[in-house]
Image: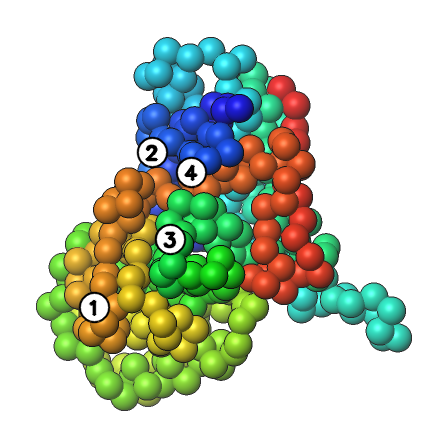
Amino acid sequence: MESLLIGLMSGTSLDGVDAVLARVSDHDARVLAHASAPFPAALRTELLALNASGTDELHRASLAGNQLARIYAELVWELLSRCRLRPAEIAAIGAHGQTVRHRPLEFDASPDGRWPAVGYTIQLNNPSLLAELTGIDVVADFRSRDLAAGGQGAPLVPLFHRHWFGKAGADVAVLNIGGIANLSVLSANGEVLGFDCGPGNVLLDGWTSRHLGQAYDQDGAWGAGGTPDPALLETLLAEPFFRREPPKSTGRDLFNLPWLDRRSADFTHLKPVDVQATLVRLTAESCAHAVKAWAPECTRLIVCGGGALNTDLMTRLRASLPSAVELQGSQEWGLPPLQVEATAFAWLAWRTLRRETGSIAAVTGARGARVLGAIYPR
């Protein structure tokens, strides 16, 4: 049996939304169409601000969720129009929402140890409004169920990575470089490990915005013109997160410009372009370290996400990996880098509708795999 689903993904890079229409079955998840839309500048600024404490947060977050739902709905209608489909022909929309806080397992443990810490993760969205605007069932809030079971709630894409990129008889690793970078290790025996490596584009984009007034460094051209500073790189890599063992996840709560400013306080003499070049090295080396530490038998690394389009970053990553590891873009496996996560959440929504688990306990650290997401009927 197969179904048509739409997947929507707006990641920590805050660059916009990717949407796919996919035909999903037990054995396949074929993309029929892809659409994307950048965030309006004012919304991007507001979403970035909501990653930190501020005035009237609940009110502002609610309005941002409404605006996100409207952007999502416009992309859904674009896909339907392009493919000449009616809403009734779509089984569901998988809408991840926009992460603005991610603090799993950090708070609220009872003093007597009866209740373990749960913490929280917040993905702004208004799935009820999205269902109303599209006339399609919406699956959202994918991460909370895993947190309730004692997990990190992230990353959630390794199960899909196994489905799409897993290769019998070989160890394969998949590196998604969005705002945050996460690695899936797909072992030849079918076992899966996954975790966040550290910053992907989040610091690169933030530094570019501060000094060039641009949302990101196109093709990594600016950073490629700088000279990495070894001492600054060593200071940045001293962050304890890099040495933590999985399960682990992170976000803008840790890796942000204030973090960079604190770590680089003794390096204000450096040119901004040299700091950018150092940040490219930080992303490349932290990702390569994760591969070497947790996928030592891997001979193929598949890269997806917006970072896969950064030529300088890919060059630095290639130089940081063992020579035996072949670097490939996800497009070589039939799924372009900007479509992977949206397709993953269409596929996860399909599993939710079927009451099938969408998480891997070994990845998130939860007490077991769980059915993810909440269903908002049309």
**Relative to residue 285, is residue 37 depicted above or below?**
above
User: Mark 4 = which residue?
Assistant: 343
- Choose mark 2 or mark 4, whichever is in front: 4
Where residue 128 is drawn, which disc sits there? none
Q: Is 144 left or right of 253, judged from the image as shown? A: right
What amino acid does circle 4 point to?
Thr
Cα–Cα gap, marks 3 and 4: 19 Å
User: Mark 2 = which residue?
Assistant: 36
User: Mark 3 = which residue?
Assistant: 167
Q: Earlier in the sequence, mark 1 or mark 4?
A: 1
Q: Is 298 left or right of 357, judged from the image as shown? A: left
Q: Earlier in the sequence, mark 1 or mark 3?
A: 3
Residue 247 point in image, percent of width and height: 56, 68
Q: Residues within 10 Å of mark 2 (few under 14, many from 20)?
A: many
Cα–Cα gap, marks 1 and 4: 26 Å
Residue 234 point in image, percent of width and height: 32, 86
Q: Quadrant of residue 299?
A: bottom left
What amino acid does circle 2 point to?
Ser
Q: Residues within 10 Å of mark 4 (few under 14, many from 20)?
A: many
Where residue 318 is drawn, which disc sits there? 1
Q: Which residue corresponds to the image point at 37% horizontal and 49% vertical from the top-left?
A: 165
Q: From where the camera sits, is residue 206 visible?
A: no
For label 2, the SS is: strand
Q: From where the camera sits, is residue 32 visible?
A: yes
Q: State the residue in front, 71 or 147.
A: 147
Q: State the residue in front, 228 or 151.
A: 151
**Relative to residue 346, is residue 51 depicted above or below?**
below
Q: Earlier in the sequence, mark 2 or mark 4?
A: 2
Cα–Cα gap, marks 3 and 2: 30 Å
